[in-house]
Structure formats: C-alpha cells, structure tokens
Image (cartoon, rainbow, N blue to C red):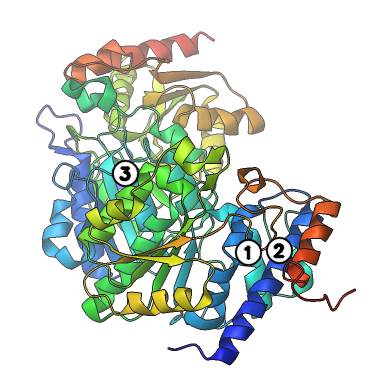
Amino acid sequence: MEITDEKLKELKEKANHIRISLIEALMAAGSGHTAGPLDMADIFTVLFFHTLKHNPKKPGWLERDRLVLSNGHICPVLYSTMAHAGYFPLEELKTLRKFGSRLQGHPHRDFLPMLESSSGPLGSGLSQAVGMALADKIDHGLTSERRIYALLSDGEQDCGQTWEAAMLAGKEKLHNLTAVIDRNNIQIEGYTENVMPLESLSDKWRAWNWHVIEIDGHNIEEIADAFEAAKAIFGKPTVIIAHTIAGKGVPEFERDYRWHGRPPNKEEGQMAIKELRTLGGKIKSEHE
Amino acid sequence: MLNPGLKLNTKIFDKDVEQVPIRQGFGEGLLEAGERNPQVVGLCADLTESTKMNLFSEKFPNRFIQVGVAEQNLASVASGLAAMGKIPFISSYAMFSPGRNWEQIRTTICYNDRPVKIAGSHAGISVGPDGGTHQAIEDIALTRVIPRMIVLSPCDSIEAKKAILASVDTGTPVYIRLAREKTPVMTTEKTPFEIGRTETFWQSDRPAVGIIATGALLHKALVVAKELEEQGIGTEVMNLSTIKPLDEKAVIELAKKVGKIVTVEEHQIKGGMGSAVAECLSQNFPVPMEFIGVDDQFGQSGTPDELIEHYGMGIKSIIKAVNKILKR
C-alpha cells in the first residue's frame, strides 16, 4: 500500500499531535518516561493510521491485527496514539498515572481491556507475540494472514528472554510476526553500548533466522514500506531495526539518556510543546 | 474408617496397593483434554517425556510446541496463545516452572488474565537422587501468593487426571503440582473431584484430631489414621487437593469438630498448604496446629523414603505430631 503525498503530510502532522499530547500527559502525571515515547511517535503513527488492521470502535474485533508493546514504560505514546485514533477521549490522557485511571503507569488490561497485553517488566513482549503468531499458525498454517506486531526497546535486548523468543520464532518460521526494535541507543542508566554493548544487533537477529530490515525510524515512508516488505517475506519472521533519535522532536531532549525515565516539568513541557508546535521554530504556532 | 461414600480404592492399606506416578495422570488427562477440546495446546521445555506430555505431543504434534530449555519463554508464549483463545498447558519441572519463570507467570499470565495451565512436575522432596536443586519445595508458596491463580495438588494419578480435565474450563490460570515417583493410588474413577472442594477420606467415630494432607503424603496420613484408631485415637483425614481457593467452610467445620489440626505436605512449612490453613483458621476459628513439612532447609540426594523420613514427613513424624497436639 503506497503512501500518497497527502497521506504522508497527514501522518507527519498526526505524529506531531501525538507527541504534543504525550508531553501534556506526562506534565499532568508528574512522572513517567519521555525519550522513548517521543522517538517512537512516528512508528506508532504509521501503525495506527496506516498499517494495522484494527477498528477503534470495535476494539474486540476478532480479525484485527495484534500489537504487543513489550517495553510498557513507553505507554504515553501508546495511549496518546490510541486516543488520537479514537479508542478513548483525548482528555483522558490527563489522567495518566493517576489513581483509578485507565491509563496505568505501565499498561494493565484490567484497567484498559482493549490493550492486547499488560506490560512493564522488560523482555517478555516478544514471547507473547510469538504465542499469538503460533496460535494463527496452528489454525491456518502458512496461509495465516493476520499480522502480529511486537514493539521492543533496544534496552531489552539485554534480556535473555528476548533471545529465547527470537530463537523460537525463527525455528517456527513465523512469517506472520513482525518485531520492531526502537534503536534509540539509550537505556535508563546510560548509552546502550556502555551499559551492555548490543552490536552487531542485526547479525544477532539474522543468526536466529530472522529477516532484518534497518530503517530511519523517523521517515514515515520508510516505516510504512518496511511493514509492507515484511508481509512479503516467506518462512521467516521479520525484525525492523528502527534507528531513532531518543527524545525526537524536542531538540533539548534529544540523544540525552537522562530523559529516559523522567517527565518534563512545567517549564520544560511548555518549551517542548512550543518546539513541537513550531516544528523547532520552522513555522509559527497557531496557539500564540 | 475410610469414607465409603467416596468410592476409594479398597486396597489403600494393602502392601500391594497399585503405585503410579502422579505425573502419569497429567499425561493421560492432557491427552483426554486434547481429544475433547481442539483449543487445548501443549508446550514443553525439553522435558516432554519426563513430564508425560509426550502422550499429548505424539497424538497432536500440530498443537504441541517444543520451546527448548527456556522456561521464561515457555510461560509468556503460552500467554500469547491464550490471548488468541487457546487453552495452553505448559510443563516442566516445578523447580523451573513456576520456579525460574515466576515473574513471567505473575505478569504475563496472571496479571494479564490469561488462562494458562502450569503443570509443575517433580515437585516435592521425593524427587530423590537428583538432589536439592531439583526438589521443588517452595512451589505452593510461589503460586498461591499470585492473584487469580488456582492451585491444585492432587493426591494420586487418578485425581491428577481429573484435576487436569477440570482445569481446562476454569477460565483462569491454574497451577497443578505433580510428583515424580510412583505413589499409592487412593482414589478411583468414581471418587468425586471438584476444584475448591475438599473430601474427608478417613473418619473415626470420635475424632480428636483433624489431619489435613495434600499430595501423595495423604497416603501416609491415612496409614497414621488407621494405626491411631487401632490405639483408640480417633482422627479425621481431609484431602486438600485444592490449596487455592481454599475450601474455608470445610476447614473451619473440621476445626470446630475436632479442635486440633495437623497439616501434612511435602513442601516448606513456611508459606505452604499448612500456612494457608492457618491463615483461614486464625481468622475464623483458631485452634492448636502442628505442621508436617520441610522446616526451612534444602533437600539432598537419597531415596524418596529416606528423604521423607529424614526431613520429618514420615509416618512416625506424623504420629509424633498428633501425640504432641493431643497434649496441647
């Protein structure tokens, strides 16, 4: 499915709105993670507004694709995207991390049943996605059409369980499974290559019989093309290593691992929103 | 005497009572569950034959997934299958599942509300010569503390088969505790089994002590009851095969009737079945209690009988506990 120029413009704008909303939610929450949600906004936008087979009005639709967010701590971008897609009202984003909110600090299906999975502890999302893909393979064999998406962080490439799941998916030749790794090079305590070197990441995945695609995780067309290309791969799962800039969209936050696990305060948040509304000063904000 | 209403094995006290490993009941139960329900799938971590999942995997190769020695993945892959409507049974040794993969069971299965059934084989100290690394004597504590989890501990292979079949339709996560060694068959196909319900296997005319047992040690509790009756001491022996949800009504009724309780389990005393009974009774009807189980130690190599004796879970130890509590 090719992206028209009009659609491309729409998706870029949508990603920007999703970033603004998640900053607002984090400011209201007073705690939470900033860098990952910002840098995954483009990929979430493409998934929810272009690639995924889903219906926000019927979240339980059986034929839908499945999306498992493994690194649950980036849920501000999941919630923001879901709200923009119409799963729940945008105003609800301000309840993030508050008592009684459906938007728990890490996603919990008990509170928001339309989530495909509760998550938080790193390293277990790919396994769940493998289970979902296996279920379709058991029922439909090599003809299963539904796509299962697993979104992973690069930090959780440290987890042994990620590799247990990778091995099984390769062994079972799960063509219906696409994993995305947010290669933003940071984790909570520093840069990934200092905490625990991961390179060569693509070679590791190839070794377990995965088809590997590397993309610019902020290029909407590349993202959409990669998801399409994965559908054409036979007899292998696909991993998209998305090279992203941690904190993307707010130059003051970008590439700084200290934004992994903290929210913007009021001043920082207002600055960030201004940056996003003006696209870093390139355009004039409508809100001024 | 043995409760005649339960249609128990009449040869319970015979020397040549049939002995079958409890895990055999798991294998047969899963096979039957698979025949009855096409949504049932099996996953194993390189112990298919040892856990008796091979009965299922040979019949339904398309519904069996070999994950290799990867228990964390085992649990979470099952969660994903359950999310798509499958009813997954996962099997390994209890030490590894729910031992090694406890957090994955807690988060991806229970917190996530996915009805995965966890069969922990080789539970208890009677695993024997393999030694302490392989003797899961903490698994009841590990599983009963997780919300939503049902914890079953069948007393013999026939009850294990019924427990497996009953667990298919609970819509919840279930942990089923299984033992490796051959153990006496106490029940028959006709003995009733229901999740959440206890049965009184032995009833003296004037019981002075209640013995609540779980798993294969129930047999030793029954032998004790018979011996004590011959000495003029009446007991009532309860088979507590569902540890969670606890049949609180039956436990409280027993405490009210006899006033003294001895619990018997092949597990650490701390956090086990006896603790669950104590939690219930201390709130509702406190009575003196004695606990038969492993007292804060690890196991070692030996024959099952040697280990059961050494760690204080044999017939003599149970009699001693009964005599002690009678004086309290």
- Which amino acid type is marked by label 2? Leu
Circle 2 is placed at which residue position?
Answer: A22
Q: Is residue B131 above or below residue A270?
A: above
Decide which of A156, B95 is in the foreground and name it: A156
Quadrant where the N terminus of chain B lies?
top left
Q: Is residue A1 left or right of residue B317?
A: right
Circle 3 is placed at which residue position?
Answer: B71
SS category of the residue bearing label 2: helix
Circle 1 is placed at which residue position?
Answer: A77
Q: Residues within 10 Å of mark 1 (few under 14, many from 20)?
A: many
Quadrant where the C terminus of chain B lies?
top right
Residue reaching furthest front? Answer: A282
Report, in whole angstroms, how far the alpha carbon at label 3 lies from the one at label 2.
Answer: 36 Å
Q: Is residue B227 above or below residue A288?
A: above
Residues beneath discs 3 and 1 located on the same chain? no
Q: Is residue B60 visible?
A: no
Quadrant in the rendering for residue B273? top left
Q: Is residue B25 left or right of residue A213?
A: left
SS category of the residue bearing label 3: helix
Q: Is residue A242 visible?
A: yes
Indicate which label's residue lies in the foreground, 3 or 1: 1
Residue A37: percent from the left, percent from the top?
62, 59
What residue is drawn where x is 21% and y is 68%? Answer: B35
Decide which of A229, A249 is in the foreground and name it: A249
- Which amino acid type is marked by label 1? Val
Q: Is residue B94 left or right of residue A250?
A: left
Decide which of A59, B121 is in the foreground and name it: A59
Q: Is residue B155 above or below residue A25?
A: above
Along the polypeptide, which appears first: circle 1 or circle 2? 2
What residue is drawn where x is 24% and y is 46%? Answer: B45
